[in-house]
Image: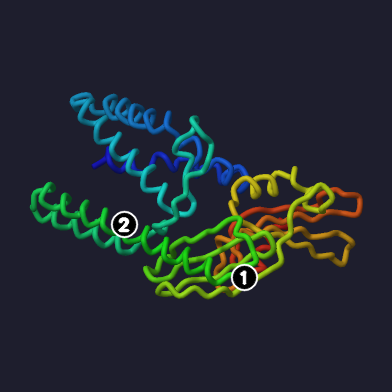
């Protein structure tokens, strides 16, 4: 049990980077710690430390369970919208299949039932073999739902617009999905409930060109991190009373109750210097402003 718990938690050890700042954490979370070399290294380290403490244990047995736990952790992360760099160093591309929410109540109930039956004395093979088949079927259903929603969403945008990026991702509710489409002219953002797509936000697209104000701040740590992390976003500018200009980037994947919760902000002075900047998940404007000026 200790081996399984350690193996399932250790890839997320990079969470400690939050202590430094959000940009560092976001840049590295689920990156190198979920890469191919570390998927092999973590089980070896776990086996070594357990063997040092409990020398009577079978190293091969411990390593196999640790390897299984680490592999399953990284593998499962591929299916949510955050994704991982699981194929690093072969490629640094983020793999994000976006069919399973970070926490899926249905999967949680299925696995919890299996563990309970195991504790009650039923042989694990009898318990978990059917569960594996059920989960495979569930994942297939989710892929089919995503494809159907994607098809309907593309039919709802103006046909004169050429899709550039399409994002369809689950929420904690089985029947509700987040939808974002970036075209050559507009960004469309909305939700799908029971496969009925409703776009609640449509904005003319702004591109980042050398003569745009966004180009002036793209080297800032927070803005740079956002641009590398977000696969689909839009940005806007707002002149402030003190003469500075606020550049706000919003990740279209995270529209929550009419608000984009994952943002990056920079305040650019008249001298083209960045006064304040911030990146992170924030769910109210007041809290965002406090973090920006803290």
Give coordinates of residue 33: x percent, y percent. Answer: 46, 36
Say which residue label 2 marks: 140
Query: Which residue is found at the position 87% from the left and 67% from the top?
Result: 241
Q: Is residue 45 left or right of residue 237?
A: left
Q: Is residue 200 left or right of residue 50?
A: right
Badge 2 density bin: few <14, some 14–19, many ≥20, Cα 10 Å: few
Query: Which residue is found at the position 45% from the left and 75% from the top?
Result: 196
Say which residue label 1 marks: 158
Give coordinates of residue 80: x percent, y percent. Answer: 43, 53
- Decide: is 95 above or below 244: above
Q: Is residue 219 left or right of residue 76?
A: right
Q: Quadrant of residue 44?
A: top left
Label 2 element class: helix
Label 1 element class: loop
In the rendered image, the quadrant that contains the C terminus is: bottom right
Which residue occupies the foreground of this view, 244 or 142?
Answer: 142
Q: Is residue 164 left or right of residue 47?
A: right
Q: Quadrant of residue 114?
A: bottom left
Give coordinates of residue 59: x percent, y percent. Answer: 23, 25
């Amino acid at each position: 049990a200790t081996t399984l718990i350690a193996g399932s938690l250790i890839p997320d050890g990079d969470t400690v980077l939050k202590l430094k700042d959000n940009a560092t954490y976001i840049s590295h979370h689920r990156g190198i710690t979920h890469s191919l070399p570390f998927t092999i290294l973590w089980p070896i380290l776990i086996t070594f430390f357990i063997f040092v403490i409990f020398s009577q244990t079978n190293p091969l047995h411990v390593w196999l369970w640790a390897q299984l736990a680490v592999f399953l952790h990284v593998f499962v992360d591929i299916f949510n919208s955050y994704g991982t760099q699981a194929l690093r160093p072969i490629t640094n591309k983020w793999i994000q299949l976006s069919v399973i929410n970070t926490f899926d109540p249905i999967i949680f109930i299925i696995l919890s039932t299996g563990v309970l039956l195991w504790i009650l004395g039923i042989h694990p093979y009898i318990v978990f073999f059917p569960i594996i088949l059920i989960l495979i079927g569930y994942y297939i259903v989710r892929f089919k739902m995503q494809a159907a929603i994607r098809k309907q969403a593309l039919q709802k945008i103006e046909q004169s617009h050429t899709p550039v990026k399409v994002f369809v991702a689950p929420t904690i509710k089985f029947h509700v999905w987040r939808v974002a489409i970036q075209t050559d002219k507009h960004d469309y953002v909305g939700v799908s409930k029971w496969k009925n797509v409703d776009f609640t936000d449509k904005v003319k697209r702004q591109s980042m060109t050398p003569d745009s104000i966004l180009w002036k701040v793209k080297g800032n740590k927070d803005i740079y991190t956002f641009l590398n992390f977000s696969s689909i976003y839009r940005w806007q500018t707002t002149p402030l009373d003190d003469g500075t200009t606020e550049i706000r980037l919003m990740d279209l994947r995270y529209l929550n109750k009419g608000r984009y919760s994952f943002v990056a902000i920079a305040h650019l002075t008249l001298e083209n210097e960045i006064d304040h900047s911030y990146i992170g998940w924030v769910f109210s404007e007041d809290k965002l402003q406090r973090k920006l000026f803290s």
